[in-house]
Amino acid sequence: MKEFIIIGAGQSGLSMAYNLSQQNKDYLILDANDCIGAPWLKRWDSLTLFTPTEYNHLPGMKFPFPKGYYPNKYEVADYLKSYVEHYTIPIEFNQKITAVTKVNGIFEITSATTKYKAKQVIIATGPFHTPYTPPCHVDIAEGVTQLHSENYKNPSQLQDGDCLVVGAGDSGVQILSEIADTGRTAYFSGTDQIKAIPQTFLGKTLWWWFTKIGFLSVNRYSKIGQWLSKGVQPVIGTDVKSLLAKENVIHMGRTLSAEKETITFQKGSISTIKNIIWATGFKPNFFWIDGISFDEMNYPSNYRGVSNDVEGLYFIGLPWLYTRGSATLGGVYKDADYLMKYISNNKVAA
Ligand SMILES: Cc1cc2nc3c(=O)[nH]c(=O)nc-3n(C[C@H](O)[C@H](O)[C@H](O)COP(=O)(O)OP(=O)(O)OC[C@H]3O[C@@H](n4cnc5c(N)ncnc54)[C@H](O)[C@@H]3O)c2cc1C
């Protein structure tokens, strides 16, 4: 039996591992993937971060690039690998956990092959679990290539012809931009009220401004934090206005329905679409953990990562776990610090 088991070896799990290592705790990380950095490597090929180097440091080890540089996904995965090697973090891969149950005060953590036991468990499985695709996708003709953004890598996956990108978040507009660059007609479906902010402003990075105005320290329990965390997150770093103004980009409004080759939008119907990328987000899945309750978005009930329901159970890496920075490379350390203090003192730190 382990003192601690962390489920998930992404940046959140590794930040907790760092803290546990510093305190010489007995722990193990379990991860469903087969290598470090897998969630990053699986994202689309041209992905670069919206946070520059100085906002990507995990606790104890600097992100190894110059200030102001926006790394790509391979550089993030390499950094996570070096982090694991540097701190000799123990990880068992290919262990997808399907149940966590507390029996007689001890956690039983079950994968397809193994039952692990631990006194305390930290869930660090990230915020992106089940890809969401609007129900009308099943009404679309078989000859149309459909991919969720989770499986989109680059335009070579598409067949010749028009492409539709659905979703007005960061992934939707970045993928739309890449597809528009191929010269084909790129239909875009989503709100036309996209809030977009540039990566730099008056010579400083957006994250510099966020820090300066205190945005990254606003917590979800404050009035302003409640408002910010429930609002639509702005798109960062894509010039949406110029993108939508391109000759081959056609904005169709929201997708309403589909019937074989014909897809109907707020602004009309189109029957020439040969490819669709659904950048329509993910739903969280924490239903495999016994005894917990959920908030209205199906995230586990907690206060700053401490489960409201099960003693010895913790969460890290959820969006707005405490602040906007909670689900970022450079911000997760604060939540890991807090949880470590809580675990050490078994009380809420001030
Ligand atoms: C497209 C995109 C761009 C982003 N850009 C930035 C950026 O520029 N800057 C920034 O700071 N943040 C960015 N983020 C946000 C965030 O940093 C990443 O989503 C990050 O990967 C989250 O880290 P995590 O450790 O919480 O979760 P993940 O990286 O998702 O890691 C979770 C781990 O848990 C494992 N796991 C999941 N379920 C189970 C299970 N049941 N059993 C065992 N293991 C399991 C997975 O295999 C995975 O390895 C971006 C996110 C996305 C989607």
Image (cartoon, helix red, strand yellow):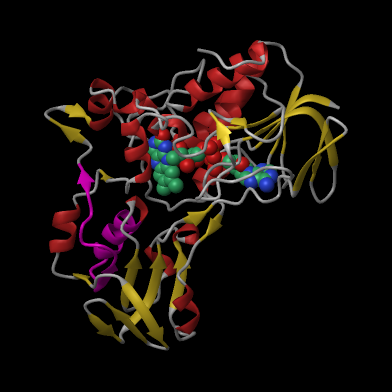
Which quarter of the image is occupied by the N terminus? top right
Q: Residue at x 29, y 61 (%)?
A: 176
Q: Position of residue 108 (x, y in %)?
A: 82, 38
Q: Is residue 151 toward the left or the right of residue 286 in the image?
A: left
- Displayed quadrant of residue 57: top left
Q: Position of residue 140 (x, y in %)?
A: 44, 83
Q: Residue at x 63, y 33 (%)?
A: 308
With respect to residue 136, does 341 lie above or below?
above
Q: Is residue 27 toward the left or the right of residue 339 in the image?
A: right
Q: Is residue 14 toward the left or the right of residue 142 in the image?
A: right
With respect to residue 142, does 183 lie above or below?
above
Q: Position of residue 282 (x, y in %)?
A: 49, 55
- Displayed quadrant of residue 3: top right
- Magenta segment includes 189: yes
Count of numbered tags: 0
Q: Magenta region: which residues?
A: 172-197
Q: Residue at x 42, y 26 (%)?
A: 330
Q: Position of residue 211 (x, y in %)?
A: 28, 23
Question: From where the camera sits, is residue 49 visible?
Answer: no
Q: Which sits in the foreground, 230 or 6?
A: 230
Question: From where the camera sits, is residue 14 visible?
Answer: yes
Q: Which sits in the foreground, 126 or 224?
A: 224
- Magenta segment includes 319: no
With respect to residue 304, does 298 lie above or below?
below
